[in-house]
Image (cartoon, helix red, strand yellow):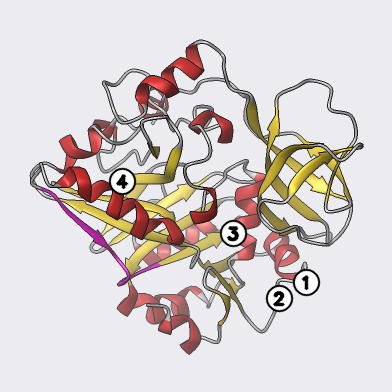
C-alpha cells in the first residue's frame, strides 16, 4: 500500500524505488542534502512479515539465527533464515511488538517467499504468518533525526539495533555515517505523519537510505540473491546477526562449522567505483585478466556522483587490480571489524 507516497508527490521508479521531484536516481543531489540537513525517505524497498500466536517465540527460535528471547521490546536483533545447507533465504531485523507478536523486516521481494517457506513448519505450531502491506516504513537521516523522532513520535530515540514504542508505532535506530531512525506505523497514518515531519526534514528518495546502508556495510538480500550466501559471507556475525550460543535452528550446523573452522571463502566488502555508472546487482567483480572473483550486492550514487557498492569478494589475499563493468574498483574500509560480535553481548551493552 504505497498510495500515500503518490499523494505526497513521490514517484515510483521501480517496485523498490521511490523518488521525489527534488532528485532522481541519476543525480547525487539527494545524497548531498543528507550531508547538510535532516532528510526523510519512504523505505519502500523494505517490508514486514508478522509472526503471532502462543508458539511464536518457540517457532522462531527453531528457524532463525537470532536468540529470540533477546528480542524483548528493547533490543531488536538482526537475524537470518537459512536452508539446511546454511545458505540464507532471507536476512532481517527482528523485534517484538507485544506478547506473542514478533515482526520481521526485510527486503520486500523476500516476504512472500519466506512466508511460504516458514508455513511448511508453522503447521506444527500455534502461529500465524502475515505479510503486512498495511504498514508504512519511514526513515529519518541526519543530525536532528533522533530529536525529531522524539518530538513527532513521543519516544526517546533508541540506540542502533534497539527499539522504542508509541501506541501502534515502533521506532528503530540503524547505524550509519549519519544518525538514522526508522519508524514503522500504520499506512493510514503515513500522510499525516509525513506532513508533520516535513516541517523539519526534506523529502528524498529511498536511494539515500540505501546509500547509508552501503556505507554502514549492511547488505539486505533481495529475491535474486536468496539461497546463495552463508551468513558470514555478508559479515552477518560481525554485525551481531548470528547467535552461536543458542540451540539448533535450520542451517545451524553448517553456519557454526564455517565459523569455527574458518571456512568462509568470500566476504562482504565496501568499495567505490571510478565512475558514475551504477552496475546492475549481480555484476561480476573482475581481475585484470577478466576472472570473476565476486559480485555486486548493492550499488548507489554518493554525494560526489560516484558509485559506491557492496560486493561479496573472494578472501584470497592478492587479487590485483579489480573492476566492475569497466570501472576501476577501489576497496574502502568497513565501519566495523570482521570478528564475531555476539548478540547477547550487544543486548547487554544497552
Q: CA distance from mark 1 to mark 2?
A: 5 Å
Where residue 188 sits in the image (x, y, percent)? 31, 79
Q: Which structural element holds mark 4?
A: strand
Crowding around mark 2 (Cα neighbors within 10 Å: few <14, some 14 to 19, many 20+) is some
**In the rendered image of this protein, does residue 335 appear above or below residue 295?**
above
Question: Residue 305 falls in which quadrant of the image?
Answer: bottom right
Image label count:
4
Q: Where is mark 3, residue-wise?
A: 209
**Residue beneath the point at 34% across and 38% down:** 75
**C-alpha gap between disc 4 and disc 3:** 20 Å
- Mark 4 crowdedness (10 Å alpha carbons): few <14, some 14-19, many ≥20: many
Q: Within the magenta stretch, is there residue 177?
A: no
- Label 4, label 2: how many angstroms apart (C-alpha)? 32 Å
For label 1, the residue is: 27
Task: State the image coordinates of residue 213 (x, y, percent, origin top left).
Answer: 60, 50
Mark 3 and mark 1 lie on one chain; the one further toward the N terminus is 1
Image marks 3 and 2: residues in contact by CB distance under 8 Å: no
Quadrant of the snapshot with the C terminus: top left
Q: Residues within 10 Å of mark 3 (few under 14, many from 20)?
A: many
Kindly report the secondary structure that dominates the magenta region of the rendered protein.
Answer: strand
In the image, 181 versus 120, the foreground residue is 120
- CB-based contact (under 8 Å), mark 1 and mark 2: yes
SS at badge 3: helix
* SS label for mark 1: loop
Q: Which mark is residue 24?
A: 2
What residue is rendered at 24% in x and 32% in y?
62
Between disc 1 and disc 4, whose residue precedes? 1
In the image, the segment drawn in magenta is: 127-136
Q: Compute the Cα span from label 3 to label 2.
A: 14 Å
- Give left or right: position of 62 versus 127: right
In the image, residue 230 above or below residue 109:
above
Q: Which residue is mark 4?
A: 95
Amino acid at each position: 500500500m504505497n498510495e500515500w507516497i503518490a499523494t505526497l508527490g513521490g514517484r515510483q521508479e521501480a517496485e523498490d524505488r521511490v523518488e521525489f521531484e527534488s532528485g532522481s536516481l541519476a543525480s547525487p543531489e539527494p545524497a548531498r542534502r543528507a550531508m547538510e540537513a535532516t532528510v526523510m525517505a519512504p523505505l519502500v524497498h523494505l517490508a514486514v512479515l508478522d509472526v503471532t500466536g502462543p508458539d511464536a517465540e518457540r517457532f522462531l527460535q527453531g528457524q532463525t539465527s537470532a536468540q529470540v528471547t533477546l528480542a524483548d521490546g528493547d533490543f531488536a536483533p538482526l537475524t537470518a533464515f537459512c536452508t539446511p545447507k546454511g545458505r540464507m533465504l532471507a536476512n532481517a531485523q527482528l523485534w517484538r511488538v507485544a506478547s506473542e507478536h514478533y515482526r520481521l523486516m526485510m527486503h520486500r521481494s523476500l516476504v512472500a517467499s519466506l512466508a511460504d517457506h516458514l508455513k511448511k513448519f508453522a503447521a506444527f505450531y500455534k502461529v500465524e504468518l502475515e505479510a503486512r502491506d498495511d504498514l508504512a516504513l519511514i526513515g529519518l537521516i541526519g543530525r536532528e533525526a533522533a530529536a525529531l523522532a522524539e518530538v513527532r513520535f513521543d519516544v526517546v530515540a533508541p540506540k542502533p539495533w534497539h527499539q522504542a514504542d508509541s501506541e501502534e508505532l515502533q521506532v528503530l535506530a540503524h547505524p550509519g555515517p549519519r544518525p538514522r531512525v526508522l519508524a514503522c506505523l500504520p499506512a493510514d497514518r503515513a500522510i499525516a505523519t509525513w506532513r508533520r515531519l516535513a516541517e523539519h526534514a526534506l523529502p528524498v528518495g529511498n536511494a539515500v537510505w540505501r546509500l547509508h546502508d552501503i556505507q554502514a556495510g549492511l547488505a539486505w538480500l533481495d529475491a535474486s540473491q536468496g539461497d546463495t550466501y552463508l551468513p558470514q559471507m555478508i559479515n552477518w556475525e560481525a554485525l551481531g546477526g548470528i547467535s552461536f550460543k543458542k540451540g539448533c535452528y535450520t542451517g545451524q550446523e553448517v553456519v557454526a562449522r564455517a565459523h569455527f573452522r574458518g571456512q568462509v571463502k568470500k566476504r562482504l566488502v565496501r568499495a567505490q567505483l571510478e565512475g558514475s555508472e551504477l552496475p546492475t546487482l549481480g555484476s561480476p567483480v573482475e581481475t585484470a585478466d577478466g576472472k570473476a572473483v565476486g559480485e555486486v550486492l548493492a550499488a548507489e550514487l554518493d554525494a560526489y556522483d560516484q558509485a559506491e557498492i557492496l560486493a561479496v569478494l573472494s578472501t584470497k589475499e592478492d587479487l590485483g587490480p579489480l573492476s566492475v563493468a569497466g570501472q576501476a574498483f577501489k576497496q574502502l574500509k568497513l565501519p566495523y571489524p570482521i570478528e564475531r560480535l555476539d548478540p547477547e553481548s550487544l543486548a547487554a551493552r544497552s
